[in-house]
Image (cartoon, rainbow, N blue to C red):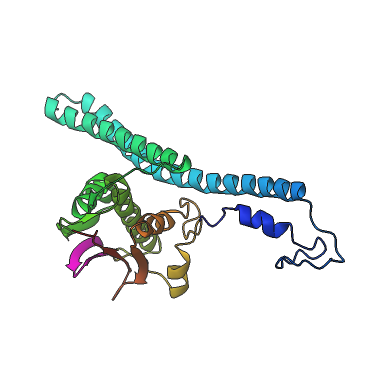
Amino acid sequence: MKPNEITQRDIEKWTRCSPTNQMCRPADPAPSSCGEIELGDARQLFDTLAAKSRLADLGEQSSALAHELRQPLFSISVANENLRMMLGRSDMTRAQLDKAIGRIAEQVERAQTIIDRTLAYASGNGPGAVIADIGLAASNAVEFLRPLFETADIEIDDRGAHVHAHIGLCQVETEQVFVNILRNAAESIESRREAGWRGAGRVAIRITMQGTGIHVVVTDNGAGLSGDTARAVFQPFFTTKPRIGTGLGLHICRQVLGKVGGVVRLLPGESEGAQVEIQLPLPQGA
């Protein structure tokens, strides 16, 4: 049952509540000194609470959708600007132009997939059997964010991510997990630079097989974090970047990974920065 879901059993309990203090108790055949809530009133209360629950859930899903769509839209914007500049140059080849156009088409398809996935969730229809290659997802996320890393002068090391293992998530949402984590790492490095640091930014991804599971570690040499922040960042709408952050990136990661029994943690780095650790079970029969 979803956290906000109300059942018929709840209605039956409400009909046995004291209207003065609303303390529910088991059915008692003995006469009560306090009047009972009428069944019609209980059903009206049920309808009201159910409607508010749907609105609250829709609000969070809408915020998550807006957060996820910002990423392909950013990539489309960058690719479009690059294409505009290419068209003004005489030394551009057809292959280079086709690559820029293809990148825009890829991100339009990604945005459509995100919308379709959200609509399927809202209608209660699951995506059916899905499978993703986690190593490919990491590589695709790096390519997706490469313009961001190049602009910010951040070195991305994904040599330890070339592990091909399958998990029970769809490919796009697995890529979105890595995109969210990598964007956070880049923003943490930028925050450290804003505080006066002038070092070389570095982000690294490592994926290893451990028995019947997969272990993922993403490290950065950014601003780091405190223990309290590490626990709070997975709460929806908590952000250390109020000007640009939505506070949903890691919350979405935890929700996605939790669907297959995955666990994600944010920890201080061994010497600087921070690291994100993900533990995922391999699908049965893998």
Quarter occupied by residue 104: top left
Main secondary structure type of the part rendered in magenta = strand
204 within the magenta span = yes
Farthest residue to the right: give it: 33
Q: Position of residue 164 (x, y in %)?
A: 15, 55
Q: Could you tell me which residue is drawn at 81 percent across and 68 percent down?
A: 30
Q: Position of residue 240 (x, y in %)?
A: 47, 60
Residue 226 appears in the rendering: yes
Q: Position of residue 280 (x, y in %)?
A: 28, 63
182 within the magenta span = no
Is 238 left, or right, of 134 in this rendering? right
Quarter occupied by residue 283: bottom left
Q: Above or below — where is 125 with respect to 161? A: above
If the image is split into quadrants, where does the C terminus sit? bottom left
Q: Nearer the viewer, residue 41 or 226?
A: 41
Is 129 left, or right, of 96 in this rendering? right
Q: Could you tell me which residue is drawn at 55 percent across and 45 percent down?
A: 59
Q: Could you tell me which residue is drawn at 40 percent across and 41 percent down?
A: 69
Stretch in magenta: 202-218
Residue 81 appears in the rendering: no
Q: Above or below — where is 218 with respect to 69? A: below
Disc tally is: 0
Q: Position of residue 87 (x, y in %)?
A: 22, 24
Is 136 left, or right, of 63 in this rendering? left
Quarter occupied by residue 195: bottom left
Q: Above or below — where is 184 with respect to 85? A: below
Farthest residue to the front: give it: 29
Q: Nearer the viewer, residue 63 or 204?
A: 63
